[in-house]
């Protein structure tokens, strides 16, 4: 991995990125769910449901959700497959704590194990999981390729990887409107609801720096996965990459 990386549009030392990302998510943890609804007009709920549709999951499966945040994806999985066992992980203590409290309050704690862990160095043995999911987490990694290789390592040989992440709109006019919304409105919403414009400016910038659909697909295949496909949602604002 190179010594330099990006934190949004800023070039930073690779060793400093995870601390900077940590500060963003410590700052927004309590209001994270509210902001997701506000910024996406509630659409993130639908995108997560679509992710689950692509999981091929059956009962009694063992699942790893990386960068779980407030545990939206684990909750959906347990609602649909109540006998699944889910390992809920995040690098950020504040976010993981919100997820844990929610699992207790909303009664799905019994299916979950929680671990403070980076998706780039997973504390699990090889060939452990039937499904690995990651929602809106990968673009924050310092070394995305290392993260993908870890996901491959911990998946069983017939396991499935699902990555839900912001991507690149396919229509150029739509893309201009989306850029305007991302850089002018989203930081203002962050200021208004969380009193933190900078974190939401980072969000917009980090989305632009993340690999587009085909590039991410190539990275997934390079990490040793097979049959990688992607599904564009809302004209490619978001994509789900699915691989075996
Ligand atoms: N998955 C949740 C969702 O879809 O709503 C939360 C997504 S939130 C935008 C991104 C999460 O990624 C944060 O909780 C953050 O702490 C976590 N994260 C950032 N870098 C990470 C890393 N290297 N390993 C694991 N989690 C990471």
Image (cartoon, rainbow, N blue to C red):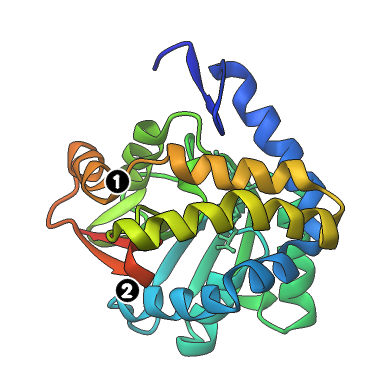
Residue at the spot 81% in from the left edge and 47% down from the top edge:
27
Q: Nearer the viewer, mark 2 or mark 1?
A: 2
Which residue is nearer to you in this view: 70 or 105?
A: 70
Local packing at callout 1 (Cα closer than 10 Å; few below 14, some 14-19, many 20+) is many
The residue that appears at 32% across and 74% down in the rendered structure is 55
Q: Which mark is residue 175?
A: none
Decide if residue 50 is on the left or right side of residue 124. Answer: left
Residue underneath mark 1? 152
Instruction: Identify the residue at image location x=60%, y=77%.
Output: 41
Q: Does residue 135 appear in the picture of this structure?
A: no
Residue 9 horizontal/vertical position (percent): 54, 29
Q: Position of residue 19 (x, y in %)?
A: 69, 28
Q: Is residue 136 left or right of residue 201?
A: left
Please tell me whether mark 1 sits on a helix, a strand or a loop. Answer: helix
Q: How many marks?
A: 2
Whether the residue under disc 2 has CB within 8 Å of ligand 1:
no
Compared to 31, does 120 lie above or below?
above
Q: Residues within 10 Å of mark 2 (few under 14, many from 20)?
A: some
**Relative depth, front residue between 131 and 186:** 186
Residue found at the very far right of the displayed protein: 195
Name the quarter where the N terminus is drawn.
top left
Left or right of 27 in this view: 16: left
Name the residue tied to disc 2.
Answer: 55
């Amino acid at each position: 991995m190179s010594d330099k990386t990006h934190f949004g549009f800023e070039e930073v030392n690779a060793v400093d990125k995870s601390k900077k990302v940590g500060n963003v998510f410590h700052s927004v943890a309590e209001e994270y769910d509210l902001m997701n609804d506000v910024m996406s007009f509630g659409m993130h709920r639908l995108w997560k449901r679509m992710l689950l549709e692509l999981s091929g999951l059956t009962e009694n499966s063992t699942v790893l959700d990386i960068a779980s945040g407030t545990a939206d994806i684990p909750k959906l999985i347990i609602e649909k497959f109540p006998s699944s066992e889910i390992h809920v992980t995040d690098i950020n203590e504040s976010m993981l704590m919100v997820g844990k409290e929610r699992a207790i309050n909303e009664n799905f704690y019994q299916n979950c194990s929680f671990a403070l862990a980076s998706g780039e160095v997973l504390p699990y043995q090889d060939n452990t999981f039937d499904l690995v999911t990651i929602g809106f987490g990968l673009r924050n990694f310092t070394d995305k390729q290392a993260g993908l290789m870890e996901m491959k390592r911990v998946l069983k040989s017939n396991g499935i990887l699902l990555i839900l992440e912001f991507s690149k709109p396919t229509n150029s006019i739509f893309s201009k409107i989306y850029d305007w919304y991302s850089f002018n409105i989203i930081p203002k919403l962050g200021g208004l609801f969380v009193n933190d414009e900078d974190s939401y400016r980072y969000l917009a910038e980090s989305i632009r720096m993340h690999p587009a659909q085909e590039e991410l697909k190539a990275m997934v295949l390079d990490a040793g996965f097979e049959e990688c496909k992607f599904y564009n949602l809302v004209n490619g604002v978001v994509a789900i990459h699915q691989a075996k």
